[in-house]
Amino acid sequence: MRVPVGIKVGAFAVVVMSGYSWFANSIPQIESKPPEELSLEGGTVTQAQLVKAGEQIYHTKGTCEICHRIGQKGTRAPDLAGVGARAAKTKPGMSAKAYIIESLLQPQAYVVEGYPPIMPQIDKPPIALNRSELWALTAFLQSQGGTVDVTLADIPATAGAAAAGGGAAAAEVKLPGDPKAGEAVFGGKGTCIACHKAGSKFTAGTVGPDLSQIAKIQTPDYIMKKILDPKGMGTVAGFPPGVMPQDLGTRLAAKEYVDLVAFLLTLK
Amino acid sequence: MSTTTAVRRSTCACLLLLAAAALVLLALPAEAQQAAKEPAYRQFPVLGSRLAVWAVAQIHLNFAAFILGVPIFAVIIEIIGWRTGEARYDWLSHEFVKLTFAAFSTTALLGALLLFLFVGYYPKFWAFMSSIFFTTYWVYALLFFAETFTVYLWYYGWDWLSGSRKWIHVCLGVLSNLFGTAILVVANSWATFMMSPAGIDDSGALKGSVWGAMNNYAWMPINIHRLIANIVFGGTIAGAYAAFRFLSAKTDEERARYDWMGYIGNFVALSAFIVLPFAGYYLGREIYAFNQTMGITMMGGFMSWLWIIQAILIGILFLGSNYYLWLGMERIPGAERYRKYVPPMLIILTIGFMVWATPRSMVITLDEARAMGGTHHPLLGFFGVMSAKNTVVNLMILTTFLSYILYRRANKIPVASWVRTGMAVQWAAFGAAAAVVVFYGVYGYFVESIVRIGFSVYQVGAVLGAIVVVMAIDVPMFKGARSTGAIRWGTIAPHSQYVLILLAVTFTWLMGLMGFARSGIRQHWHVYGVLRDTSVDAVTPALGYAANVITVVTLVFFALVMFIFWIGGLGEKGQAGAHGHAAPVLAGGSDKDD
């Protein structure tokens, strides 16, 4: 029987493309996952936890490894082995942590000789580390041969202010809620006051993270989801998991929920 | 039903479709305003929104590339036919435009479908894009109307605007290409803005005019790269169509005709393909200039293995194109003189292919890595870097050009008095270019990367210079050359036609892969660094998944193409040729090779 040309050509095309697919499936399979947000503000975190969190950021969200290595000389960026000790001597009169923070936030202020000025400001999109993440990353870099003494207060308050969702995403959120009414929900029906601090008015809560700058370090999307699904959004490092009531979102009326979010978005 | 009535009906149907698509386009601002009140995303049933957009966008782009690429060389062929008075070129040009015409309304429909998907499933994203690019939607719609009417007039006016009015017809062809290119340029500004946004402030609002957003880093390199790639793509698809018709042909005459058409398709594809890597360099350089992190992620991050797959595909395209030329030489009396060049050319291409496809880091087990002293092979690791790859790709381009030159002169013996000098200069040009390429390739291992990147410009310059010099000598040298016999069109080995199909399939698949690369380097951003992807699909998938999607989508594309060409061919059953274009008789030979 004579096989029609269309069948032969079709089968040939399928075989060729299957070969390409097979090869693509036989090489290392790497996905690029969106980074997770880390929040440490207001919480009790040990130095070891801080360094570990920083190491995680170094490998993932910070994308540092694209150019930097630890213990291996790179052509694009300096070896970071021993940077914790070296940083104290790089710029006269500048401490190790101050130099590292400057390198992260204003990388062009001092470029190591022999390397191109290509490092981006990592508190700005697309990397956009928040204050907590900058703190942890600085601690990790200090731990490379130096002494970890960086505190959250060392990270400028304006750092990481760029919304993680990008400028366009930040600009588009305009909630109809009333922050004043939301403040009442925070201190009343929402019972948030029992665990959280928030600005100068609510200072008693210590069980959960301090929310005094929550709008600066987190996206509106995160805040809204955290109220509706606290477990699903994870627990801030250094705090006990499962304490925040899972049914908070269902206990609030829609207007109360929107008001509460509007209030939290004023905390900068 | 008469042909005229059928034409009128199909014209009306297409115009209605286009009008509907244009209305949808112009209604988008209202949709965008509505989007501000809606959720950021909706979930497309079963497939998911990302996959749906991915598939439709890729098929739409394939069709768009075809209908924009083919008219570019169709009008050139028409001009050749007009100036030389050879009817076969006019027939071929008409045949190419016929293929474009058949795919025109499908492209528009897929574009409208893509738009619906964006508006419906990514409303916030679309609202943001509209806030920047609204004015360009009008320009796009107007250009689309202009392009449609011009192509209609070009196709249906073939007979009406013949003879002394042929120049008007040619102008219509040129005009439709200008409109088509303008459409491409406008649409590219949207896609490239997503990669390398410009002209906006920190909040994502337009700072000045829309021109600032259009004229972003990746825009011009993508314009050039896509324009060239569209010609290659159009050539390979037209070649595959001819191959299919060749294999299905019932008569020698038909076989000869489609053998010639396949040769022209491959010639067009190859000519444009040779310069495509240079446009790719330009694009890569501009991506680095926009954002080093993006550039490094593209070449050295999670996408690094994508370039190995790309190298394999391009290697297959080079080998396939050359093999087709060598098979074609077997039907040319006098070509036996050049058989001795085939083995060395094959060796250069094969070694080049192997070097280009050598990864920097091997996929090996831990034990193997320990035994080897790392993931870089002590010897092969040297071939995994850009110095080696730039060198071999330039040598492969030179070799392919040599194949073409030998094919071109296969049945010709030059009679010019200065042949010996001319030949010597040509070989010297080849040798000098190869020496420059190899010298900078080796020297690149001893300098910093920032210096090494600049070397590729010298290598490319040497190759392009050699091509210009060789052609500038070849054309006058072979003018009035003595023929060693007519080309026996239609007698080429049938498996050569599968090479043409291989080229079309591989290039289409490569376009899908490069589309994934262009889109994937944005990672979890709709608009890089400006508007983040917070949907469930924010993960950029691994290459295996991407390859499976590309394969399925490419299959769907070819199935649609075959269906459309079949539909288009139904109207011609029993006719000598559409619009009075009786096919030229080529069987029995022609000593014209192009």
Image: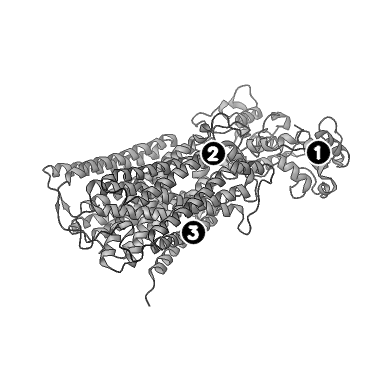
User: According to the image, label 1 marks what residue?
Assistant: A259
Residue B401 can be seen in this image = yes
Q: Nearer the viewer, mark 1 or mark 3?
A: 1
Eyeballing the image, is B163 above or below B491? above
The label on residue B225 is none
In the rendered structure, the answer to whether residue B141 lies left or right of residue B154 reads right
- Residue B329, quarter of the rendered image: bottom left
Q: Between residues B138 and B136, which one lies in front from this camera angle?
A: B138
Pointer 1 and pointer 3 on the same chain: no
User: According to the image, label 2 marks what residue?
Assistant: B293
Residue A79 can be seen in this image = no
- Residue A147, quarter of the rendered image: top right
The label on residue B551 is 3
Inter-mark Cα distance, 2 to 1: 39 Å
Q: Residue furthest top?
A: A93
Q: Between residues A10 and A99, which one lies in front from this camera angle?
A: A10
Which amino acid type corresponds to the residue marked 1 in the rendered image?
A: Asp
